[in-house]
Amino acid sequence: SQTAMSFRLFALSRPAVLGALPASRLTAARCLSTAVQQHNAVARGVAPVSSSNTNVTRTIGAMPTSIGAPRYAGVSVLGCAIAMVAVGGCAQGIGQLFAALVMGIARNPSMKEDLFTYTLIGMGFLEFLAIVVILISFMLLYSE
């Protein structure tokens, strides 16, 4: 069938398969590999890569950048998402801080001004932590 033929041609275009071939068939396999890659590029509607352009990296799941190194876009998005979980921890800390303020004022209303000052200092530290987490997550998102 057409699918099985395409899979066999795709498998021959992979470098691991090319390394397993003997030297006499290596040249023919490389020619076939180039032909298959150009056929696949035309089928996708992309201009085929010429054989003189050797700096393009072909890896599964990677997008080539302008300098030829692969850029793993999904990995940077996952790293950013995992780092942004800490912003939820900062929000939870601010909630607990104001809950403690309300509880402290309910226990001793005469210390209202001191407790509010301590609450604002604690909130400043938590906001600083949230800003640092956001900066790190954007650094992870836009780094290569």
Image (cartoon, grey):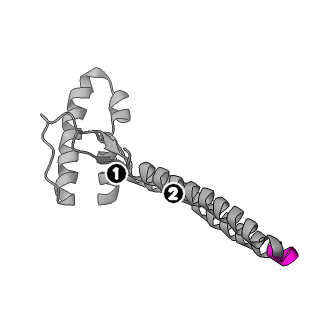
Q: In this figure, which residue is indicated by the disc labeled 1?
A: 7
Mark 1 falls on what kind of element? helix
* Quadrant of image for the C terminus: top left
Residue, x 76% and y 73% (percent of image)? 112
Any magenta on residue 57?
Answer: no
Query: Magenta stretch?
Result: 105-109
**Relative vertical location of residue 53 with respect to residue 63 in this rendering, above or below:** above
| Total residue callouts | 2
User: What percent of the width, then of the height, locates residue 4?
Assistant: 35, 54
Amino acid on which disc 2 is placed: Ile
* Quadrant of image for the N terminus: bottom left
Can residue 82 be seen at all in this image of the molecule? no
State the image quarter where residue 100 is shown: bottom right
User: Which label number is shown at residue 135?
Assistant: none
- Cα separation between marks 2 and 1: 49 Å
Mark 2 falls on what kind of element? helix
**In the visual, does 7 lie left or right of 82?**
left
